[in-house]
Image (cartoon, rainbow, N blue to C red):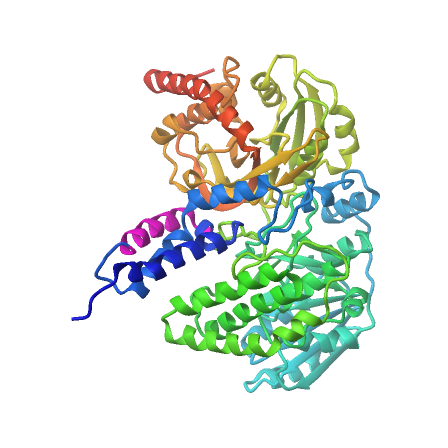
Amino acid sequence: MKSHDKDQDRAPIETARQSARERAPLGLAAQFLAKPRANAWQHSISAFLAKLPFLPPRRRAKFAYSAAKRDFDALAARLLDISANGVSESGAAVDFDGFRGRSRRGVLGAEWHKAFVAALQDTGRDIYPEITVSLVTYNSEKWLDGFFASLLAQAYPLDKINLIVVDNGSTDGTLDALASWLDGNKARFASADLVRQSNVGFGMGHDVALRQSTDAYVLVTNVDLVLPQDALTTLVRAAEADREDVASWEMRQSPYEHPKYYDPVTLETSWSSHACILIRRSAYIDVGGYEERIFMYGEDVELSYRFRGAGYVTRYVPQAAVTHFVDFEDAGERPSQFAGSVAANVLLRHRYGDAATVADGMQNLSNLVATTQNAQRCAALETAQTQIAKDAGHFASTKLPTVPAHFPFNGFDYDVTRQGHAVVLDNAEIVDPPLVSVITRTHGPNTRLLEEALLSVGHQTYSNIEHIIVEDRTDYAEATVKRAQYLARPSLRYLKSGGAGRSAAGNAGLAAATGTYALFLDNDDLLFADHIEILVRSLLNTANAPAAYALSWEVPTFYDQGGNYREAAPVSKLGQSRKFSAKALQKQNFLPIQSVLFKRELFNRFGGFDEDIDFLEDWNLWYRYAQAGDFLHVAKTTSMYRVPGDQVFRAARESGMEDARAQVRRANEKVASEGQPHK
């Protein structure tokens, strides 16, 4: 029997563990943070299996890598350490004010933004320039009837639409169906053309239409979706109101919204999905169009990065939604999608990343190859490796950015992603939508964060909102609220609290509120555009529930003396993913204040904040309101709250919270022992 060198066995295990910890992506898009509870479980199991001595070293190394990349505490500590030292994932210095902070400046009150908001709120002027609709088909016969029916039903005048259908060599009945439909409907459009060609891929198929068009805007769309009646009207109106440096306007997909991050303050996004997107044709021609060496999967990210690398902005328009038929269970094209996505990610790193970013991508690929066992995926990875070897030089030397921009890479993803991609979005109109009162407490001279909170409410997809700003003991916010009046939907009010402290200010807001539902949004927190809509729908569908809450991001934030800030990558807290339990809430608060939408009648029944509690006052409020019944849980990230990023300040703040926690637990125990507390 051969002698067995245990140190030699441990070498690949330690290498895998160290590789995972050093190279694991820092943002939420990483798989170890996308599903906190599932990955915490997988971390424990993988760590256990990595220690089993009878498993081969290669298998133990695989488990060690799997465990290390899900080591939540170690990765969170590394993230804060990197953020505190002002360096990026690749080690490059980061400007203290940060990419997102700069883009948010000057939005509130800008003339373009006033016109843009009016367009989204359906109060802008109707304008109908001629536009082109570009449709690429490939064996798409089953989708044609639904798509064309929705196109014919558009409120946008059909005689202002130039339709170009590019067929990429279909072999089913697609061409016959297209020819028949065009014969019967061509005269209804400004023009309608069918281009037949071999299969050159998704992007290059649309490239034909984009170059053939002479219109200012081209709608690039999939065929496996349907457009709501006002889709084109809303999108074009928004584009006409927007700034000249905006290159594209992406529509929200339903029933499953794409989980990628977008800025709720500016609605800017680092990259756009091209399932259905309006493109400014002049910007497309300016940057050179779709990348011809990406056949499918990743061409939308590449063009988005190229837009932004040329100084353009890419916008997300969640108020314009399409129904996109996505089947998560259909594995028919998954191997080709897997290969295309992996290859595109590594190739884009060669064009938009530095040497460390490229090295990260190649190491990610190496780790994936080493740990993949599924035969189809192994074959797909061979295809990806071949493409990368052939095209890496082309991507590294052509179409490079000409202006500084933020090009995120996050493992085989790109920007950070929100949890809840499979949560269903309902596009059905809410008849007589109930009024929602959003209450924002503010204090002090730095109103910059208040401006951002106001904008995130103004961008909500839900339309019936009164926003009440309550200033606590200072006199700085009234002018900001006056500048923001154009965001009112239907009302935006300023109040001065007559009491002393946060709890009194919150109660003043609740007393002034008139909505059926209420929500607290502190001035340093933000809502994604669907936050109120998705919670209102949940409560309307479950009449007896007193409140509903969704997942939130915690965002470590670093401030300087001038009020500027830099945000670190967001983190999902494990506790938020648990099933609601009033018993658990009595001992621990897992509900960030802005995450909860509640029936305002609870204020009349149970009262407001306990004004003797200065900190963690919302925890006690939620526990008292939970006496009315369990809160509904929506497993989607729809808001974000800031916490101090500076670790010294954070540690000092945390130590000071112990007394506050003890006070709230005593108050909660009193509620539990006395039963339901009435006002």
User: 228 or 611, which lies in front?
Assistant: 611
Q: Position of residue 533 (x, y in %)?
A: 57, 43
User: 156 or 221, which lies in front?
Assistant: 221
Q: Identify which residue is drawn at 49% across, 49% down.
A: 419
Q: Identify which residue is drawn at 43% across, 71% down.
A: 331
Left or right, 306 with respect to 610, comes to right
Does the rendering let one see residue 92? Answer: yes
| Residue extent of the magenta highlight | 34-50
Q: Identify which residue is drawn at 42% across, 66% down.
A: 329
Decide whether the magenta segment is chiefly helix, strand or loop: helix
User: 475 or 402, which lies in front?
Assistant: 402
In this view, 424 is above or below 351 = above
Left or right, 406 with respect to 369, comes to right
Quadrant of res 309: bottom right
- Quadrant showing the N terminus: bottom left
In the rendered image, residue 267 lying in the magenta stretch gets the answer no
Q: Position of residue 92 (x, y in %)?
A: 64, 51
Q: Where is residue 40 in the image (x, y as percent from the top left)?
A: 37, 47
User: 296 or 130, which lies in front?
Assistant: 296
Q: Where is residue 63 in the image (x, y as percent from the top left)?
A: 33, 58
